[in-house]
Amino acid sequence: MSDAHPNPFADETVAQGYDAWFATPLGATVDRLEKALISRLAEPRPGETALDVGTGTGHFAAFLADRGLRVTGVDSSPAMLSVARAKRQDIAWQEAEVEALPYADGAFDLVLSVTALEFVPDPQAAVREMYRVVRPGGRLVVAVLNANSTWATARQREAETMDTPFRDAYFYSPQEFVALLAPLGDVRWHASVFVGPQGEGLPFAGLLEGMGQAFFRERGALLVGRVEK
């Protein structure tokens, strides 16, 4: 893994583009599929405390808040947090590094991190920090982009000719992902998004999701893992 991890989200233009993608037909479908799996593994419950690590523009923090959780979103990018703060005032936003979270041990019922570990210099330290702030009986849910998916291949090809946030990203195979989380405890994992990065199969997204999760989970675009404490 490369040691060079400049913050790819320091530009507010990138932050605005990130949110705009979810308004496209493909983005809206991917968002629905990802949230369905994340919700299944995270089991968010109203009244719980939740931390969204690498919150970015607060997309998934808002998802949790809308389900009645008391949410804190943390990110190292002021540009991304600026967009997040403008969208929601009912979420506590804080700037901090993922590997050094400014919270007490066991502070949260649920800690969620979606597509953040691809960009941190020390992912082992990051997952240890996330787990540290999970309360006993709580759960850590982490999602990363799958190196074995067509989405990762497309992002890598784009980064060869364009200045994209994925230029320095590290994509995890399912085996690497499980190995990263395994020191924390038993890992329960699955995958989501079996449509293609250019919208291949989009009209049949529901059918592809069912078949992919049943038979081809190692090819899903998003790997989601859960560890209980």
Image: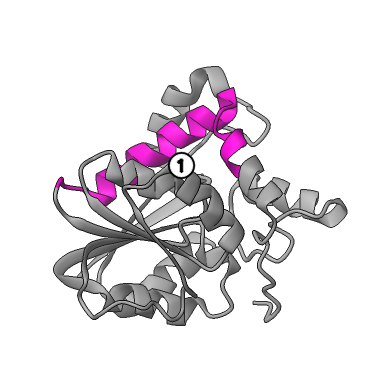
Q: Residue at x 65, y 64 (%)?
A: 169
Who's the residue at 57% across and 39% down the image?
19
Visible in this render: residue 170? yes
Inspect the image, locate mark 1, and give the three-letter code of the amino acid beneath it.
Answer: Lys
Q: Can residue 147 be seen by looking at this rendering?
A: no
- What is the quadrant of residue 2 in the picture? bottom right
Tell me the quadrant of the picture where the N terminus can be found.
bottom right
Residue 20 in magenta stretch: yes
Task: Give the residues in magenta.
Answer: 18-46
SS at badge 1: helix
Q: Is residue 205 left or right of residue 108?
A: right
The residue closer to the viewer here, 163 or 34, is 163
Considering depth in this image, is 106 or 162 the residue closer to the camera? 106
Is 156 displayed left or right of 191 in the figure?
right
Circle 1 residue:
87
Instruction: Decide: is 147 above or below 4.
Output: above
